[in-house]
């Protein structure tokens, strides 16, 4: 399996562009034999530490640490919500407002599904409309918190599930699309010296190709 594109690398961090369908870290069960992004990076660059994860169905920029010190440093920034994470997403239907904020707690309901619930963890998703298509809306999504499936759950909750989502939305409709239309577009954080590091992952043809059909 070819190594995904490396967007940025130094002695402390590596940012790679994960293809849709690839695991971020090794899995158990039926997916155990699939090579994860973490394993591929370790094969090429030695020890690498996980800082955050992208869902298997999501493509785009993912950052890893290359030392324990860098790992602790960047995990701290994630915990303090100091890391900027911008996504591209295509949501079914026409969004009424050009921008907005979804502030609803997210909790686990079982069977791998998450949902909005009063017992959930505080979760905030901000968005801006950057394109209006015939059957969908293209969005820039600013992930303020990092709950599992947060973006997918929030847009499903407001009646605009993401295109091609295998878990959220009308099953028959979602199965018409080859992938989940969610892409980790831009990442920004501070290096150990305080320098700002920014990486941008251009959406791949399997993402832009679906956009052309919406």
Image: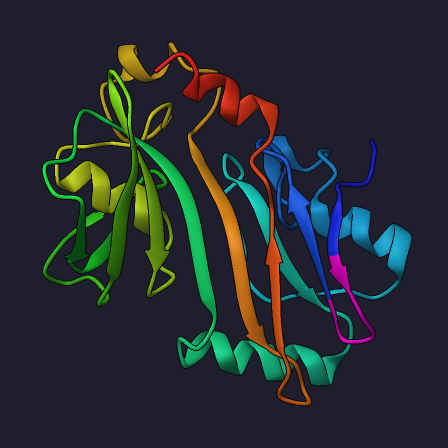
Relative image position of residue 169 (x, y in whole percent)? 24, 26
* Quadrant of the drawing holding the C terminus: top left
Which image quadrant: the N terminus? top right
- Position above or below: 192 against 1: below
Q: Give how far across and how far down residue 69 sits, in percent.
A: 71, 85
- Residue drawn at the location 81% of the way across and 40% of the way down: 3
Magenta stretch holds residue 9: yes
Q: Which residues are magenta?
A: 8-13
Residue 83: x %, y % from top left? 47, 71
Instruction: Decide if residue 99 is in sight here.
Output: yes
Left/right placement of residue 13 relative to residue 2 reads left
Q: How is the image coloured?
A: rainbow
> Which residue shows up at 52% across the image and 55% down it?
186
Front one among 43 and 17: 17
In the picture, measured across the screen, residue 178 lies left or right of residue 165, that is right
Rendered residue at 62%/83% (across/down): 72
Is residue 109 visible in this depiction of the protein?
no
Up-down relation of residue 158 to residue 67 (above or below): above
Q: Horizontally, is 12 left or right of 73 in the view?
A: right
Q: Residue at x 51, y 26 (%)?
A: 207
* Between 167 and 137, the one nearer to me in the picture: 137
User: On screen, 58 above or below 49?
Assistant: above
**Residue 11 highlighted magenta (yes or no):** yes
Q: Quadrant of residue 125?
A: bottom left
Residue 79 placement (x, y as % from top left): 44, 78
> Is residue 65 or residue 34 the one in the foreground?
65
Viewer-proximal residue among 76 and 9: 9
């Amino acid at each position: 399996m070819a190594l995904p594109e490396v967007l940025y690398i130094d002695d402390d961090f590596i940012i790679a562009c994960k293809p849709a369908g690839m695991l971020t870290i090794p899995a158990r069960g039926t997916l155990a034999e699939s090579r994860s992004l973490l394993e591929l990076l370790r094969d090429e660059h030695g020890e690498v530490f996980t800082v955050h994860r992208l869902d298997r169905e999501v493509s785009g920029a993912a950052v890893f640490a290359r030392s324990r010190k860098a790992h602790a440093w960047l995990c701290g920034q994630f915990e303090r919500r100091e890391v900027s994470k911008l996504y591209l997403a295509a949501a079914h239907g026409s969004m009424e407002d050009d921008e907005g904020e979804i502030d609803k707690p997210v909790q686990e309901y079982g069977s791998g599904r998450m949902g909005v619930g009063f017992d959930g963890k505080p979760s905030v998703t901000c968005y801006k409309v950057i394109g209006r298509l015939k059957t969908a809306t293209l969005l820039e999504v600013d992930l303020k918190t990092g709950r599992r499936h947060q973006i997918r759950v929030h847009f499903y909750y407001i009646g605009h599930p993401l295109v091609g989502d295998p878990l959220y939305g009308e099953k028959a409709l979602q199965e018409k699309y080859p992938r989940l239309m969610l892409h980790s577009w831009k990442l920004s954080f501070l290096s150990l010296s305080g320098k700002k590091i920014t990486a941008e992952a251009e959406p791949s043809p399997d993402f832009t190709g679906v956009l052309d059909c919406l």
